Image (cartoon, helix red, strand yellow):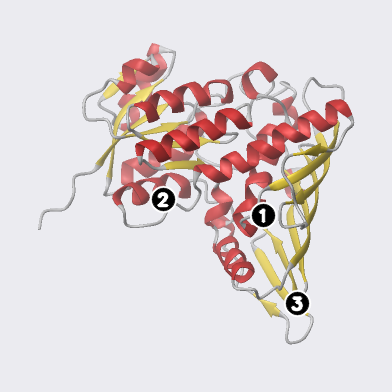
Amino acid sequence: MNPAPPIQCGILGAGWWATLAHIPVLQRHPGAELLAVQSRDRSKAAAVARDFGARHACTGVEELLAVPGLQAVIVASTPNVHYVQAKAALERGLHVLIEKPMTFTAADARELVELAAQKRVQLLISCPWHFTAHSIAARRLIADGALGRIKLISVLMTNPLDRLLKGIDTTPTFGLDNVYVEPCLGSYNDPAIAGGGQIYCQVSHVAAYLTFLTGFRAAEVFAHFDRDESVNDIYNAMTVKLESGTLVTLASTAATPLAERAYEVRIFGSKAILMLELWRGTMTLVPFAGERTEFTPVPPDATYPAQAPAANFIDAIRGIAPNGSPGELGLASMEIIEAACQSASSGRNILLRPCP
């Protein structure tokens, strides 16, 4: 039997993150081929196509979407065009992997989810932490009832991005190697392009992760922001109530040294407590009755599997793996982000849906 031909893929927004996290996957995945790349800068598009082996270099979105044989698109452009570009691709029946934040509004995210379902194509939100061994195990423990009823989740998430969000320095400080090109000025610090600061850039991860773990969406959101003399929020303090009744406290900031960044998740159930530190790759289960379990640490190079979403995207299209980060999680994240922005602006608790 002849193997299935590789999935023909295009990249919208062939910038620093696409060249770091997505394109290398398409290069080495036996079931994928990088067909076309797009950048508004013709010379940049040509350079990426040449250096990474794409057959087509495009400057326009419609130009790329019209490339014959195209089957799937990765939207790695700036957040202000995620919705328009993803919608255009979905309307053509193409599979779509979209970077976070998914859109600027929950309504736009909902439309993309519904359109993907209508077209019967894969829609995946690029959240690498959904693919770590500990995250998958934690979700399974919760689903299997090992923690009992989840009563409280506490999250502290920090990442050293304040200089990027303030437009002081575009050099990434994530501790990532092999950067092909640096981010463009404005991509992270201009609210008209990025949506906002920490809430759109990093809390988008946490907001999706809550639904990933529990299966429940937010019902209520209350938030305070501190902009630290910036146009963007740099510090966030939030309380969320999930539709299950679970209470969530969420604190996040972009102002932290790289050596001290944190992603602490504490899940308090009626039977046990589960403690994760995602940046450090540790997870501990502490039951109220029984022995403490220390899970095997995740290796340092796998704590943030930046290339996992693109690999899963191809496998999901080919039907050999489930979609590990479906668009519904991006929608759940956008509901929290939108509500948090409304709350921080108005000083009110924002109600999204009924809960116990």
Give the Cα separation between the discs numbered 1 and 2: 21 Å
Q: Position of residue 77 (x, y in %)?
A: 50, 25
| Residue 130 in the image: above or below residue 202 | below
Point 37% across, 57% down: residue: 321
| Camera-nearest residue between 317 and 283 | 317
Mark 3 surroundings within 10 Å by alpha-carbon count, few (fewer than 14), some (14 through 19), many (20 or more): some
Q: Secondary structure at mark 2?
A: helix
Q: Secondary structure at mark 3?
A: loop
Point 75% across, 52% down: residue: 355
Residue type at numbered disc 1: Trp
Q: Which residue is mark 1?
A: 279
Give the Cα separation between the discs numbered 1 and 3: 26 Å
Residue type at numbered disc 3: Lys
Q: Which residue is mark 3?
A: 271
Q: Which residue is mark 2?
A: 312
Residue type at numbered disc 2: Asn
Mark found first going from the N terminus, 1 or 3: 3
Q: Position of residue 302 (x, y in %)?
A: 54, 57
Horizontal side, residue 105 vs residue 18: left or right: right
Point 71% across, 26% down: residue: 196
Nearer the camera: disc 1 or disc 2: 2
Horizontal side, residue 99 vs residue 337: left or right: left
Q: Position of residue 347 (x, y in %)?
A: 90, 31
Question: Does any portion of residue 146 appear in the rendered image?
Answer: yes
- Image quadrant for the N terminus? bottom left
| Camera-nearest residue between 147 and 15 | 147
| Residue 83 in the image: above or below residue 322 | above
Horizontal side, residue 232 vs residue 145: left or right: right
Mark 1 surroundings within 10 Å by alpha-carbon count, few (fewer than 14), some (14 through 19), many (20 or more): many
Nearer the camera: disc 1 or disc 3: 3
Point 38% across, 12% down: residue: 42
Give the tally of numbered discs.
3
